[in-house]
Amino acid sequence: MFTLYVKDVFSAAHRLENYHGKCEELHGHNFFVEAFFSGETLDSDGMLVDFKVLKQYVRNILNILDHKFINEIPFFRERASSSEYIAIFIFQELKSVIKEKNVSLREVKVWESENAYAAYGE
C-alpha cells in the first residue's frame, strides 16, 4: 500500500455559534490542510498518481473556503463551522472529484493553529 500526502493552506473567518467563549466572536485562521491518499497500483511511470493532480484537487476545494466567512457557505449553515466539520467538508468535496480509480482519499487534517488539528477519514 502506498500513501501520498499533499498540504495546502487557506485563510478564512468563522464564528462558533453556541460556543460560549471567545471563539463565538468572529475571528479568522490560516487553516493548514493535509490530505492523505492511498493505493496499490502504480502506473507505467512508477507513480500512484502525479502529485500535481492531487495538489490541484486540494487547491480547487480550498478555493471554496479561501477568504470566505465559513458560516455563510451552505454546508455550514446548518452545522458548526468547527475544524471537525471543515475536515468533513473538505473530505467529502475532495472525495467527490477524484477521478483516478487506483487512488482513494484516506484522511484530511485541518490545522487551525500550529498545535491543534481535527482529522476526518473513512
Image (spheres, helix red, strand yellow):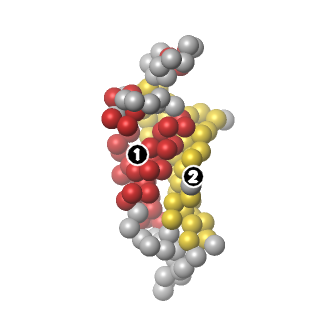
Q: Identify the residue at horizontal 51%, vertical 60% (top origin).
A: 105
Residue 69 left/right relative to 9: left
Q: Position of residue 44 (x, y in %)?
A: 48, 86
The amino acid marked with disc number 2 is Gly
Q: Mark 2 vs mark 1: which is more N-terminal?
A: 1
Residue 18 image point, x, y percent = 51, 17
Instruction: Bin the neighbour count of mark 2 within 10 Å (Cα to Cα): few under 14, some 14-19, many 20 and up.
Output: some
- Foreground of the two, 85 or 61: 85
| Residue that appears at 40% across and 51% down | 93
The residue labelled by disc 1 is 62
Q: CA distance from mark 2 to mark 1?
A: 17 Å
Q: Residue at x 49, y 44 (%)?
A: 88
Callout 2 secondary element? strand
Q: Residues within 10 Å of mark 1 (few under 14, many from 20)?
A: many
In this picture, residue 113 sits left or right of residue 90: right
Residue located at (54% from left, 50% from top): 108
Which residue lies most toward the right here? Answer: 115
Q: Residue furthest bottom?
A: 44
Disc 2 designates what residue? 121
Q: Position of residue 89 (x, y in %)?
A: 44, 43
- Tell me if residue 9 can be seen: no
Question: Residue 31 — which label?
Answer: none
Q: Relative to 71, say whether 65 is above or below.
A: below
Q: Position of residue 47 (x, y in %)?
A: 52, 77
Mark 1, secondary structure of its residue: helix
Amino acid type, mark 1: Leu
Q: Nearer the viewer, mark 2 or mark 1?
A: 2
